[in-house]
Structure formats: C-alpha cells, structure tokens
Amino acid sequence: MTIRRLILAVPVACALATMATLASADSIEVNYEYSLKPQVDFSKMPKGPLKIAAFTDSRGVEPTTFTADLQADEPVADIVADALVQGFTAGGAALVDDGEKLTLEGDITEVQIVDKNGAIEATIRTRATLKRGSQSAYSTVIFGRAEAASVDEAIRLSLDKLVNSLILDDYFLMEVL
C-alpha cells in the first residue's frame, strides 16, 4: 500500500510544484508603442497589400512566458506581432486582413532576459517569413537586444530593435516595395 501512495504522491507533488512556480512568477505589462520616426514609406506598396498573420511561439513554454520568473500579460507572440504592425503602420502601410498579396508570418524562437551588473538585457528572436501567395518570398531571423534599468523598458527597446531589423532590411524591402 505504501508504494501505491508513493507512486501517486510523486506526480501530484510535481504538479503542485509546477503550479507554485507559475503562481509565484512576476507578471509584467509591456504596453509597447512604436515611437521611432518612420524611416521607410510603406504607403505605396506596388507589390501588393500586406497582411501580418498571427505569430506562433515554438519555445516550448507557456505563451505568456518571458522567463521562468516573469510572465507577460498577453502571449509574447501577440506582443511581437503587434510591435511589427505598429512599425508598418507608422511607415504608412495599409495592412489588410484579406485580399493580401503578401503575408508576413512569424515564430518566436527565443526570449532571454538577464541581469547584467544591475542593468537588464532583453533579447527577442523571431523567425520571420514573407509569403507571396503560398510561396516563401523572404525568410530570416530578426532579433532585438537592448539594455535598460528596468525589465519593461529593456523589452520595449528590444522590440524597437526587432521591428527595425526587419523594416530596414534591404532584401525584405526589395520584396515589399
């Protein structure tokens, strides 16, 4: 009888420990706003209208996880996709939900937040693919890395850099403009 109780107790204890870890994780509200001056005019896109599809997250963690101790208020993939939407619309892009000729898809591959001697460094990597119909027209890994005094500021600055790493990429621009 003791072995049966032990066999049942171990998985229950593991589940409770996991729930306690998730419950003790700090939550952060990112509130990202693309505030950089647009450097590219997307108002006329001769190769067709652009749709930014829902992004995915292949990190193998909960969608809202930044780190084991830090949870976002919404899925990280949504935060990154929204940052790109803001970057394109700041440049005058008229994004569409249907009737698109171009579709931007993304997959979050890494999020890392580290304390570097009192400064917080945030890194976000995303695989971005531009599709023309069902064909892949362009694919790359975009990322942003930034240091700041607080976690939320480091995340916002890294999102700025992530957005600019795509919208200022010459090869990407050749495919959309």
Image: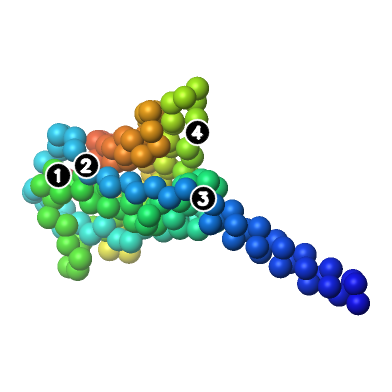
**Where residue 47 sits: x, y (%)?**
16, 53
Marks 2/4: CA distance?
Answer: 23 Å
- Element class at badge 1: helix
Q: Which mark is residue 10?
A: none
- Element class at badge 4: strand
Q: Which mark is residue 114?
A: 4
Marks 2/3: CA distance?
Answer: 27 Å
Q: Mark 2 belongs to which amino acid? A: Tyr
Marks 3/1: CA distance?
Answer: 34 Å
- Element class at badge 3: loop
Which residue is pictured at 50% across the width and 58% down the height?
A: 62
Residue nearest the viewer, comparing 35 with 43: 35
**Where residue 45 sits: x, y (%)?**
12, 50
Which is more N-terminal, label 4 or label 3? 3
Which residue bears the numbered disc 3?
A: 25
Which residue is pictured at 28% across the width and 63% down the height?
A: 133
Which is more N-terminal, label 4 or label 2? 2
**Where residue 152 sits: x, y (%)?**
36, 39
Q: Which mark is residue 34?
A: 2
Which residue is pictured at 45% across the width and 58% down the height?
A: 63
Identify the image's colour scheme: rainbow, by chain, secondary structure or one colour.
rainbow
Q: Residues within 10 Å of mark 4 (few under 14, many from 20)?
A: some
Residue nearest the viewer, comparing 89 with 113: 113
Farthest-out residue, bottom: 1
Q: Which mark is residue 90?
A: 1
Farthest-out residue, top: 117
